[in-house]
Image (cartoon, rainbow, N blue to C red):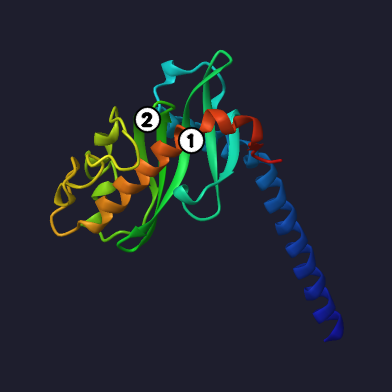
Amino acid sequence: MLKTMQKHGLILALFAAGSTGLTAAINLLTKSTIADQAALQQKALFDQVIPPNLYTNNLQGSCYLVTDASLGKGAHKVYIARNGDTPVAAVIEATAPDGYSGAIRLLVGADFSGTVLGTRVIEHHETPGLGDKIELRLSDWITHFSGKKINGPDDSHWAVKKDGGDFDQFTGATITPRAVVNAVRRAGIFAQTLPAQLPELSACGE
């Protein structure tokens, strides 16, 4: 009986070791592929918020960490687009903390003169059928920021129509678009301060 138990225990141990080794090997083999796919998806998203013909550098490799209350709590990543050696625009991670169902994470492309180049939502928990129209797959609403200029923090155009601004709200859902409009405006204003900040910024991964 004891020998049988020992035999079964040894078989189970060998099986567990083999499974662990196989899992580790598969992870090692697929790790670079997963990383490559993630990089391609990120590049495709960047191309939606900043025209690729605007810059010549490796945008994904020009990443900095910033901490600014206007972008939301904590550190946010900023990617600097350069034409030659000249910084021309940025892709900024921003957070709208006041969505209807919680924080809304955004990617905002903007130049340094106050013009928003593009915006996409990268994470949200808004109500399906109402607030989720901020997603491009459900509505083109998010595309209406492209080409809009921000004339200072008190620009009255940067509000939903219910508040006297230029941007549509959703039927039955004003809180969500209001939160996004305000977050994009803040990110666009922050972008104007970036050229002066660049020498002081820490690169991602440092």
Residue type, label 1: Gln
* 1 vs 2, front mark: 2
Q: Quadrant of residue 102?
A: bottom left
The N terminus appears in which quarter of the rendering?
bottom right
- Which label is found at residue 114? 2
- Which label is found at residue 140? none
Q: Considering depth in this image, is 101 or 33 the residue closer to the camera?
A: 101
Q: Is residue 132 visible?
A: no
Q: CA distance from mark 1 to mark 2?
A: 24 Å
Where does the image place residue 8, in percent across and percent down from the top left?
Answer: 78, 74
Residue 126 shown left or right of residue 82 in the figure? left
Residue type, label 2: Gly
Determine the residue positioned at 35% across, 59% down. 98
- Which label is found at residue 42? 1
Where does the image place residue 191, in percent across and percent down from the top left?
Answer: 46, 34
Is disc 2 placed on a helix, strand or loop?
A: loop
Is disc 1 placed on a helix, strand or loop?
A: helix
Q: Quadrant of residue 200?
A: top right
Residue 43 shown left or right of residue 204 in the figure? left
In this view, 159 is above or below 99: above
The C terminus appears in which quarter of the rendering?
top right
Whether residues under marks 1 and 2 lie with C-beta atoms below 8 angstroms apart, the answer is no
Determine the residue positioned at 59% across, 29% down. 62
Determine the residue positioned at 52% across, 48% down. 68
